[in-house]
Image: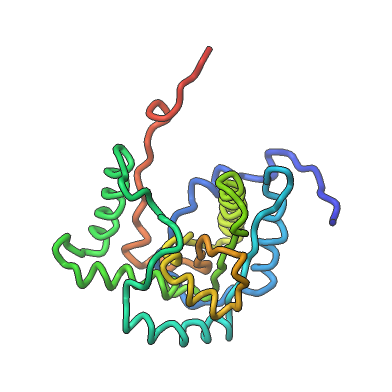
Amino acid sequence: MPEVEATTSAAVNVRDALMSRHSCRSFTRRPVDGATLRELLDIARFAPSGGNLQPWMVHVLSGDSMLQFRAQLTPKLQADPLGGTAEYHVYPPQLKEPYRSRRQKSGEDMYAHIGVHREDSVARRRQFACNFDFFGAPAAMFFFVDRSMGSPQWSDLGMFIQSIMLLARERGLESCAQESWAIWHKEVREFLSIEPALMLFCGMAIGFGDYAAPINRLRTERATVDEFAVFHD
C-alpha cells in the first residue's frame, strides 16, 4: 500500500467540492482519461468502512466498452422503457413525511427546469429514460456489494461513492449517482458477467458537465440544520 502523506486542512477545500457537487443530468461527449478514472478509485479506496471490510466492487465503462454497453441496452430500452423489477426498493414502498414531499418537490423542480408539465407523461418517461444513456456521459461506474452484507456495509459503500464524487469535483468533473439502474440489474450483470453473489447497488455517470443545459441549473433544496439536528450543551 502506498504511503499516505499527512496534509493540512488548508490544502484541501472539501467545502467547495461538497457545495458544488450536484446530480449532473447532461454531459458533454468530451472523454475522461482512463488514468483519471483509475486515480479517483485509487484515492477513494481510503474511505472508511467498518472493520475495514471495504465491501465494494466497481466496474468502469468508457470508450469501446461504453459504446458496446449502449448498443446492447438500446433495443431493450426501446422495447420496455421502464425496465424490469428492481432488485431492491430504492425508496420505502410507503414513503412518509417529510420524505415524500421532499422527493415530490425534487422531481417537480427538475421537470420545471426543462419545461415538462405534470400531465405530460410521455416527456417525463423520455427524461427518465435519459438515465440509461448516463445522460450522455462518456464514462460510468457500476457499484456492487456482496449479498451477504447488511445495511452497515451499504452505508460504507455510500461513503466510498461520495468520496469518488467529491474527488471528481476536484478534477473539474461532474457526476450523477443513479440508483435507477437497479431496474436493469439483469442486463448490467449479463453484460459485465457478474457473479450471482454480487448485487448491483447503483451506477454513476461521470464526465464534463454541459452547463448550457437548463436541467443542470437545478439545485435541490436542503433542510436547515435546525430541522434535523439537536445540540445538547
Furthest residue in direction top, as rendered: 233
Is residue 14 visible in the rendered image? The answer is: yes
**Residue at image location 32% in from the left, 76% down from the top:** 81
**At which x and y percent is residue 59?**
62, 70
In front: 216, or 93?
A: 93
Task: Name above or below for residue 206 compared with residue 9.
Answer: below
> In the drawing, does residue 103 fall left or right of residue 210?
left
Is residue 163 visible in the rendered image? The answer is: no
**At which x and y percent is residue 82?**
32, 72
**At which x and y percent is residue 70?**
47, 82
In front: 206, or 60?
A: 60
**Residue at image location 56% in from the left, 61% down from the top:** 172
**Residue at image location 31% in from the left, 51% down from the top:** 106
| Picture colour scheme | rainbow
Indicate the quadrant where residue 211 lies. Answer: bottom left
**Residue at image location 69% in from the left, 38% down from the top:** 9
> In the drawing, does residue 192 fall left or right of residue 105?
right
Count of numbered labels shown in the rendering: 0
Indicate the quadrant where residue 164 lies. Answer: bottom right
**At which x and y percent is residue 209?**
46, 66
> In the drawing, does residue 231 fall left or right of residue 110?
right
Task: Name above or below for residue 212 compared with residue 63.
Answer: above
In front: 196, or 222?
A: 196
Furthest residue in direction left, as rendered: 119
Task: Name above or below for residue 214 compared with residue 155.
Answer: below
Quadrant of the image containing the N terminus:
bottom right
